[in-house]
Image (cartoon, rainbow, N blue to C red):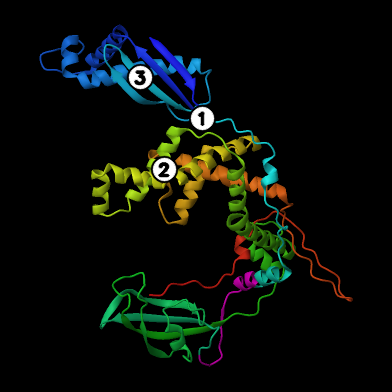
Amino acid sequence: MQIFAKKIDGANAVITVKFDKKTVAEAETLAAAKIAKEANIAGFRRGKIPPAIIKLRFKDQLDADARSRLAARAFEDGFVKLEKPDLIGAPVVTKTSCGDDLELELKLSLRPAIELGDYNALTPSFKPIKVSPESLRQTLERAADSAVAPETIDEKRGLQNGDYAQFDFDGYADGEPIANASAKDYEIKIGANSFIPGFEEQMLGLQVGEERKIAVTFPKEYHVSTIAGKEATFDVTLKAIKVKKPAVINDETAKKLLPNIEDANVEKLTAAVEKTLFDEQKSKLYNEELRPKLLEALLKTYDFDLPEIILEQEIDHLAAQKAGTLDDEGLQKLQNDESALKALREEFRSEAKERVKTTLLIDAIAKAEGIEISDREVAQAIYYQAMQTGQDPKKTLDYYRKNNLTAVVKMTLTEDRALTALLDRKSDNTAKTEKPKKSAKEGGSETSKTKPSAKKAAKEVEPKVSGA
């Protein structure tokens, strides 16, 4: 056996090996013995099939098995000659030639050594994130309002904007009842535009116990296609008019909004809302402005060799995605025209390079930062995404695992955590509220900082109902 191994550059290596006829024959004999143990041929007992019969009946399988054995042997010896570099993925047999001897060429993808230096210096500068007093006040007021339940009034008057209407309704289109378009004791806030357009306006003036026929037209983009764009009528009976008392921000309100926080009070509610608003502002700033700038700076600064096999695989992946959007004529052209397929792949070479480079660079920074994403975190991310989109979490996770997509999720999480770490380091990003300007007679006010998370308290809670 003659073997040669060399590094082409910092990310690629090649192993070439020549096996003489005797070595190939030995590999074929071992492969034949393995096939003979498992093969079923009429007239022969399992394990007693003559080698000549095996070689005749299973020639293709025998050749593939023998070459696989020899390729594995070539890799083991070549890997040692290359001083056991850091591999990415498995080696790929790129050339095979047969004559009296068997020649194989294996290409290896190596993880390039990236001299990072002071990568923190590339982080863009930005002003510390602060929550404005006005934003904090408005959000607290909306949160407090959400904790107030509407109460039925005894006053005899017509329904007004801002009232909460409790009513029964039955919907009809083309003279027939509409499926799932009837309800008892349904409740909406008049003026919130949560029902079918035009419906709430026609309820104005209704008194408790009064019936009214309301005519509307369903939106063309309505989610139920059978009634989208259709005219409909609703028989409505008002059961009660409810109003909300003005919201009060006090400790009792805080307890309602922070049910899982011990000794909840206004101070803790304010801190929780402030933290939520801060996180929202931070997420928006990081994702929409700073992270793209940081990533662009990193990609421009660092230059290193890319593994060719990984690059070609990424090009194939992007081209396959594009091909999946083509019509039958476009697909047929790709299948019959090699130049068209080549041109399609070349369209994605630049994007593929950037993707592979980004992956390797983020991986290097994550290692420098001591960032590791566990399999459990990956599973949790997939579960959460599935729940957010109304999919079955377990089936989604199984799909990701079967299709080798968990690595993509892991890389996304790694990139997010690594870039966030660099941005957080640039500024003291802890929640801060801008202090109101002091007047001659007034002092400033500060908000204490605590850790409780209260997303519920930070969101405007309006009655959210869907129309029929």
Q: Does residue 398 appear in the picture of this structure?
A: no
Q: Residue at x 50, y 15 (%)?
A: 81
The magenta region covers 142-158
Q: CA distance from mark 3 to mark 1?
A: 20 Å
Quickly name the residue at label 3: 104
The image's mark for residue 11 is 1
Q: CA distance from mark 1 to mark 2?
A: 28 Å
Image x and y of residue 273, in percent: 67, 63
Q: Which amino acid type is shown beneath numbered disc 3?
A: Leu
Please give left or right for residue 434 compared with residue 29 in the image: right
Nearer-N-terminus badge (2/3): 3
Q: Quadrant of residue 373?
A: top right
Q: Secondary structure at mark 2?
A: helix
Asked if the residue at tag 3 contacts the one at tag 2, i.e. Cβ–Cβ closer than 8 Å, the answer is no
Residue 60 lies within the magenta run: no
Q: Secondary structure at mark 3?
A: strand
Quickly name the residue at label 2: 400
Q: Residue at x 63, y 59 (%)?
A: 454
Image x and y of residue 355, in percent: 49, 43
Is 436 or 97 nearer to us in this picture?
A: 97
Q: Which amino acid type is shown beneath numbered disc 2?
A: Tyr
Nearer-N-terminus badge (3/1): 1
Q: How many marks?
A: 3
Is 381 or 248 nearer to us in this picture?
A: 381
Query: Badge 1: how crowded within 10 Å, few (<14), some, or many (20+)?
Result: many
Asked if the residue at tag 2 contacts the one at tag 1, i.e. Cβ–Cβ closer than 8 Å, the answer is no
Q: CA distance from mark 2 to mark 3?
A: 34 Å
Please give left or right for residue 319 compared with residue 428 in the image: left
Q: Secondary structure at mark 1?
A: loop
Q: Residue at x 29, y 81 (%)?
A: 173
Q: Does residue 121 appear in the picture of this structure?
A: yes
